[in-house]
């Protein structure tokens, strides 16, 4: 079992998850693949990724992200069955994580998968399971956990990688924090932390809509949306 990184309320003390999913502070079983419940608050999976909180800026009026100095930004657009989520990724703070996410996006790996784990007041997690709750195997090796070096925090609106109990085990699964989950940052509760690599800049209302869907238990998986929340595509571009 993989240990989770973000659970509904206790990710920091993540226990092992079931079927490569997350198991959280209380050792609750997570969903298979890279997502699981990290105990009451776990995020993880076979190569699981976990969710993070992020304080979120105002939604942008369009999908263009720029800074006052006109620097190019790396923008990811996640098209879901509930609407579009636009994120600004941070390759300067988390170069390995952004490059990994971009490779999977460019390969259309995420197309047709689902948000398989949704916990109110915590996070939404996806990127590893299909509508039949079957894990899609990673096609690249696990990556180094950049949580300790990025300087980024798990606050509302941030995107982070889910992983198992092994610090450097993240592959495809990611989560978006719907609250400030700073206990997922490196520290006493989570020594290695969960690696944040970007933030939502448009479509946080879509994230909140997903967070509010009705959930159930499917086999070993908890917090599974009753109605599939599909990931139609993930596109990463320089803007």
Image (spheres, grey):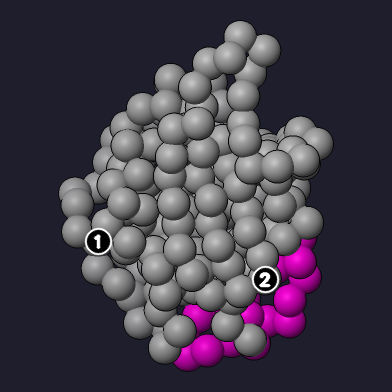
**Is residue 196 shown in magenta?**
no
Q: Is residue 144 above or below residue 80?
A: above
Say the numbered circle drawn on residue 21. none
Residue at the spot 58% in from the left edge and 67% down from the top edge? 80
Task: Name the quadrant containing residue 65.
Answer: top right
Q: Are marks 2 and 1 in contact (CB under 8 Å)?
A: no
* x then y, percent, for residue 202: 70, 45
> SS class of the residue under badge 1?
loop
**Is residue 220 shown in magenta?**
yes
Q: Is residue 129 left or right of residue 119?
A: left
- State the CA–CA distance, disc 2 to disc 1: 25 Å
> SS class of the residue under badge 2?
loop
Residue at the spot 70% in from the left edge and 58% down from the top edge? 207
Mark 1 neighbour class, 10 Å CA radius: few under 14, some 14 to 19, many 20 or more: some
Q: Is residue 177 left or right of residue 173?
A: right
**Quadrant that contains the N terminus:** bottom left
Which of discs 2 and 1 lies nearer the camera? The answer is 2
Number of numbered markers: 2
* x then y, percent, for residue 17: 43, 67
* x then y, percent, for residue 108: 33, 61
**Would residue 36 be visible to someone looking at this image?**
no
Q: Is residue 61 left or right of residue 196?
A: right
**Would residue 109 be visible to someone looking at this image?**
yes
Q: Is residue 75 above or below residue 117?
A: above
**Closest to the observer: 224 or 16?**
224
Q: Is residue 89 left or right of residue 166?
A: right
Q: Is residue 231 above or below residue 143?
A: below
First to last magenta residue range: 208-226
* x then y, percent, for residue 156: 72, 43
Query: What residue is pinned by disc 2?
Result: 82
Query: What residue is pinned by disc 1?
Result: 138
């Amino acid at each position: 079992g993989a240990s989770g990184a973000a659970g509904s309320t206790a990710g920091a003390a993540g226990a092992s998850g079931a079927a490569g999913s997350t198991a959280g502070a209380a050792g609750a079983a997570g969903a298979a693949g890279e997502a699981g419940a990290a105990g009451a608050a776990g995020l993880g999976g076979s190569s699981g990724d976990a969710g993070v909180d992020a304080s979120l800026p105002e939604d942008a009026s369009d999908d263009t992200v720029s800074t006052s100095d006109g620097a190019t930004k790396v923008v990811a657009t996640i098209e879901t069955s509930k609407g579009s989520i636009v994120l600004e990724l941070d390759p300067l703070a988390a170069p390995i994580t952004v490059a990994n996410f971009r490779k999977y996006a460019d390969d259309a790996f995420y197309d047709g998968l689902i948000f398989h784990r949704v916990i109110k007041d915590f996070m939404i997690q996806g990127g590893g399971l299909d509508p039949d709750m079957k894990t899609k195997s990673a096609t690249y090796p696990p990556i180094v956990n950049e949580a300790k070096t990025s300087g980024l925090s798990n606050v509302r609106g941030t995107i982070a990688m889910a992983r198992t109990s092994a610090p450097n085990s993240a592959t495809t699964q990611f989560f978006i924090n719907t609250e400030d989950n700073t206990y997922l940052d490196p520290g006493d509760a989570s020594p290695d932390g969960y690696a944040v690599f970007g933030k939502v800049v448009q479509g946080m209302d879509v994230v909140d809509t997903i967070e509010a869907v009705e959930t159930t238990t499917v086999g070993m998986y908890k917090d599974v949306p009753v109605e599939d929340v599909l990931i139609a595509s993930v596109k990463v571009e320089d803007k």
